[in-house]
Amino acid sequence: MADLTPLPRPGFREMPWANGLGTTREIALDPDAGAGGAPFRWRLSMADLAGPGPFSELAGVDRILVLLAGEAVVLHVAGRAPAPLGRHDAIAFPGDVPTRLEMPPGAGRDLNLMWDRARATGRVDVLAAGAGLVLGAPLAFAVALGGPARVEVDGATAELGPEDALRIDAGQELAVRAGDVYVAQVG
């Protein structure tokens, strides 16, 4: 049976970016630093995007970014073609290479799942009402996107307010009953 822990948005901890150019709201974290320089085992966070600029480089970290809001957003990851991002688009990339965001000044927001590539793995899915997912990792998080959402995990229902999160330990099956939901899995 899954263990479900609500994580309401007002409880997210605000933290400065490693490069000092912005702030993020930390949803959840395994703070165990790795020997390869990763500052944590994994971290799930939500950040406001105010305009163009460089991303923080984090040694030994891989990440998946999902755009929640923003117009004309393009991610430039070293060694890759520019990646235009639309609402709810995801991009996976190494967190320890030069990366910069291109967008007009204004408001944007993203969700980031980051993990120490030597000790963990990560996966992200964006699901709409009626969709389901077999959870393949021992730990998952569901985050309501844009509005309230309702999810069912192994027969137990959880209501989420806008941008609230739910920690899912040992869940097997997740179904979205209402709203749009971001699901991050960490192994």
Image (cartoon, helix red, strand yellow):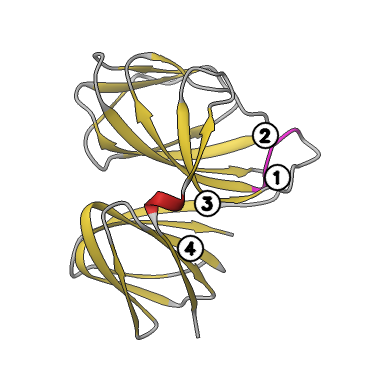
Asked if residue 40 is among those painted magenta in the image, a careful observer would answer yes
Name the residue at 34% across, 19% down.
Answer: 82
Q: Which residues are magenta?
A: 37-41
* Crowding near the residue tagged with mark 2, few <14, some 14–19, many ≥20 C-alpha atoms within 10 Å: many
Q: Secondary structure at mark 1?
A: loop
Position of 91 with respect to 71 (left or right) is right
Q: Secondary structure at mark 3?
A: strand
Amino acid carrying mark 2 in the image: Gly
Principal SS element in the magenta part?
loop
Sequence order check, earlier mark of 1 and 2: 2
Q: Is residue 103 visible?
A: yes
Sequence order check, earlier mark of 2 and 4: 2
Residue 161 lies, in percent from the top left, at 27, 60
Q: Nearer the viewer, mark 2 or mark 4?
A: 4
Give the residue at mark 1: 118
Position of 37 with respect to 153 (left or right) is right
Residue 172 lies, in percent from the top left, at 45, 77
Q: Nearer the viewer, residue 154 or 62?
A: 154
Give the residue at mark 2: 60
Amino acid carrying mark 1 in the image: Ala
Position of 64 with respect to 169 (left or right) is left
Amino acid carrying mark 3 in the image: Gly
Give the residue at mark 4: 140
Q: Secondary structure at mark 2?
A: loop
